Image: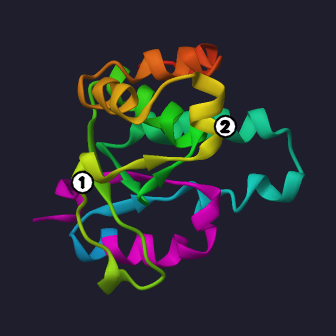
Amino acid sequence: MTANDRLVVYTAQSKQYFYCRDAVCEFVFRQGAVPLNPFRVFDYFLGDRVRRDDVRDANHVILQRSDEVWVFGETIADGVLIEIAQAAMSGKNVRYFTINNHADGIRELAPSRLNFEREVYASSGLGKAEILRHLLGGTAVEVAAALGRHGEVRGTG
């Protein structure tokens, strides 16, 4: 495999796991892919030096330029759900993994083992089974709509 043949992977993770960003990148490299980790590219919203919406827009651009989206962590935040919805709208493969501060501790995760942050349930009014059905059915945009964040989901472009 040449460098040009390597998969480019957008890594999505909750800010709750910010401290694991290096292990996530190491894990992706060990899988033979190239990680695009928003927390490594922009730290945490560039320390609020720019508008947070500008960083979210930039994250959208790098997600669009990736080949796949890999989601890290058993507990999914609302922002990660938006990224999953964007990936689904763009026809990108989404894979799920545990998260750990050591790359050796990260494993592929069955989507049925996912949970969602409390705010996701409270804001969306959806239960776990319904959210999972949308994620696995390619209709994650419906979860974004239930969260009141439909406008943040953009497909290609």
Is residue 145 or residue 11 the one in the foreground?
145
Identity, as a three-letter code, of the amino acid under mark 2: Arg
Q: Residue 73: horizontal and vertical position, in percent?
A: 43, 60
Side of 137 relative to 9 (left or right): left
Side of 133 relative to 36 (left or right): left
Side of 54 relative to 15 (left or right): right
Quickly name the residue at label 2.
56
Q: Residue 82: horizontal and vertical position, in percent?
A: 52, 31
* Colour mapping used in the image: rainbow
Is residue 146 or residue 51 the one in the foreground?
146
| Residue at point 58%, 66% (across, down) | 17
Quickly name the residue at label 1.
7
Q: Residue furthest left?
A: 1
Mark before the other along the chain sequence, 1 or 2 = 1
Q: Is residue 90 in sight in this rendering?
A: no
Is residue 121 or residue 18 the one in the foreground?
121
